[in-house]
């Protein structure tokens, strides 16, 4: 059953989310603030030629920070909407479950990158800059974590696909309240940002890092 197939029967439930109160307003402000803060981080010019250290800093400051803030606000808004529409829109409970999975996997993935993989890439670049030879085993040490990170990207994309399907391509049902429409926009914005981040890592950062590792 699609999200808009229950509109007539669930009008009262839609009204409920209009009066959630200050907490919901705070969540919506958090979503808006996440977008404003991301916009303040200018686009990186020449990602193919910028230093890997600078590139990684850009990915963290613009995309990782945004993803953490956006995901926290979305899961809170989803929980409230799911509770308000428990009878009329049970699909939201499914979306909430999927998003909880996405959020946990995403936070774990970004933490691993920031704590382990990214520092390895930065160290490789530093050694290459100083023209210091590295042992072959050290140069090869990037391959496995990069492969694992790319596999995790595939998993994140699969969960995003499930969320998009569960929300009818992020289309709010007819008669949905402003908070429901805000949720759909926030989910779409997060997906687009994550797909862009994954592209930058898989197609730009990781190939450059592996190439540099082979040269050192």
Image (cartoon, rainbow, N blue to C red):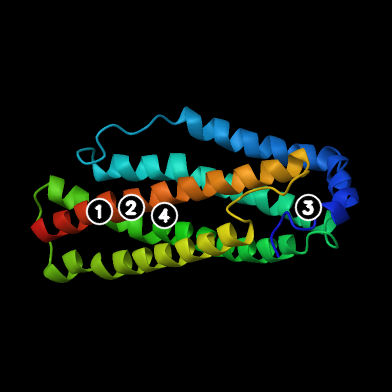
Find the distance from the CA under tag 1 to the CA under tag 2. 17 Å
Front-most of 130 and 42? 42
Q: Position of residue 97 (x, y in %)?
A: 67, 66
In the image, residue 213 sits, relative to residue 58, either above or below, namely below
Q: Nearer the viewer, mark 1 or mark 4?
A: 4
**Image quadrant in which you'd find residue 99:** bottom right
Q: Earlier in the sequence, mark 1 or mark 3?
A: 3
Q: Position of residue 70 (x, y in %)?
A: 59, 46
Residue that badge 3 annotates = 81
Q: Nearer the viewer, mark 1 or mark 2?
A: 2
Characterize the local packing of mark 2: few (<14), some (14-19) or many (20 or more) Cα atoms within 10 angstroms: many
Q: Position of residue 129 (x, y in %)?
A: 14, 45
Residue that badge 2 annotates = 201
Q: Regarding mark 4 in the picture, which secondary structure is present there?
A: helix
Q: Regarding mark 3 in the picture, which secondary structure is present there?
A: helix
Q: Regarding mark 2 in the picture, which secondary structure is present there?
A: helix
Characterize the local packing of mark 1: few (<14), some (14-19) or many (20 or more) Cα atoms within 10 angstroms: some
Residue that badge 1 annotates = 123
Residue that badge 4 annotates = 114
Find the distance from the CA under tag 1 to the CA under tag 4. 13 Å
């Amino acid at each position: 059953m699609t999200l808009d197939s229950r509109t007539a029967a669930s009008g009262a439930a839609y009204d409920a989310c209009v009066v959630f109160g200050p907490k919901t307003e705070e969540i919506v402000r958090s979503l808006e603030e996440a977008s404003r803060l991301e916009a303040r981080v200018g686009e990186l010019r020449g990602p193919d030629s910028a230093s890997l250290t600078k590139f990684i800093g850009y990915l963290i400051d613009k995309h990782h920070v945004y993803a953490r803030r956006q995901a926290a606000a979305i899961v809170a808004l989803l929980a409230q909407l799911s509770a308000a529409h428990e009878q009329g829109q049970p699909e939201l409970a499914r979306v909430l479950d999927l998003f909880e999975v996405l959020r946990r996997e995403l936070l774990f993935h970004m933490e691993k990158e920031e704590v382990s993989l990214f520092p390895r890439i930065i160290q490789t670049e530093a050694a290459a800059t100083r023209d210091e030879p590295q042992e072959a085993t050290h140069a090869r040490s990037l391959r496995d974590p990069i492969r694992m990170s790319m596999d995790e990207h595939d998993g994140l994309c699969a969960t995003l696909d499930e969320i998009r399907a569960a929300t009818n391509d992020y289309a709010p049902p007819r008669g949905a309240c402003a908070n429901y429409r805000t949720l759909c926009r926030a989910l779409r914005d997060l997906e687009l940002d994550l797909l862009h981040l994954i592209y930058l890592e898989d197609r730009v950062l990781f190939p450059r890092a592996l190439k540099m590792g082979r040269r050192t």
